[in-house]
Amino acid sequence: MATEFKTLDVRPILESGGEPFQAIMGAVDALAPGEGLKLLAPFRPQPLFTVMARRGFDYELEELQDGDFEVRFLPKQAEPEIRYSGDGPSPDLWPEPSIDLDLSELDPPEPMVRLLAEAERLDPGEVIFAVLSREPLFLFPELTSRGHQWVGNFDATGNLYRIMIRVGSRAE
């Protein structure tokens, strides 16, 4: 989704000997959720980058042909919360998935049934990656009780749930 920007040109304020900080903060306070601020300035406003980062903005900087600068302050994207089983080695150390499944078109409980069947078929340590249409709350305790590890979160759109399952040892 493209960010919409409000524009603030602080060059006239600076040319008249004024200080633009209050105007900038007023413009930021007036932004709607998800909106960004396009700032035009005669210099690179380095100290403002830290102030805006604390207020939840990243920036893109472009030097204009006349030597002035355009800075686009964009709202930072929230990182989706990652849930995990919490036992065993970090998912960063897991091997690449042996199986990739797109189960996003299936209705419950079919994704859970398919994932548990795949986990039974694989050797310990192998990894399954799957995409689901919702967070599989009933699957988590079932995986844990069977000795499997898991890690998952929603994608950036918040529409699909991604899960990786590391197959555990078989019960004797």
Image: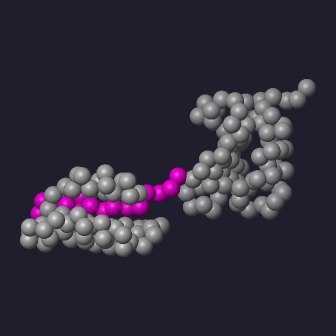
Q: Is residue 20 magenta?
A: no
Magenta range is 62-79
| 93 horizontally vs 14: left or right | right
Name the residue: 84% across, 57% down: 109
Identified at 71% across, 59% down, the residue is 134
Using the image as rendered, state which of residue 19 and residue 156 is in the foreground: 19
Where 114 sits versus 94, above or below?
below
Query: Horizontal and vertical percent for residue 88?
Result: 69, 30
Residue 13 visible to an observer of this rendering: yes
Up-down: is 96 above or below 137? above
Q: Residue furthest top?
A: 172
Give the residue displayed 78% in from the left and 32% down from the top. Answer: 168
Foreground residue among 114 and 27 = 27
Whether residue 98 appears in this view of the structure is no
Give how far across and how far down residue 154 sits, in percent.
62, 55
Q: How far across and how far down the image is residue 56, in percent?
A: 41, 57
Name the side, left or right, on which 159 lies relative to 135: left
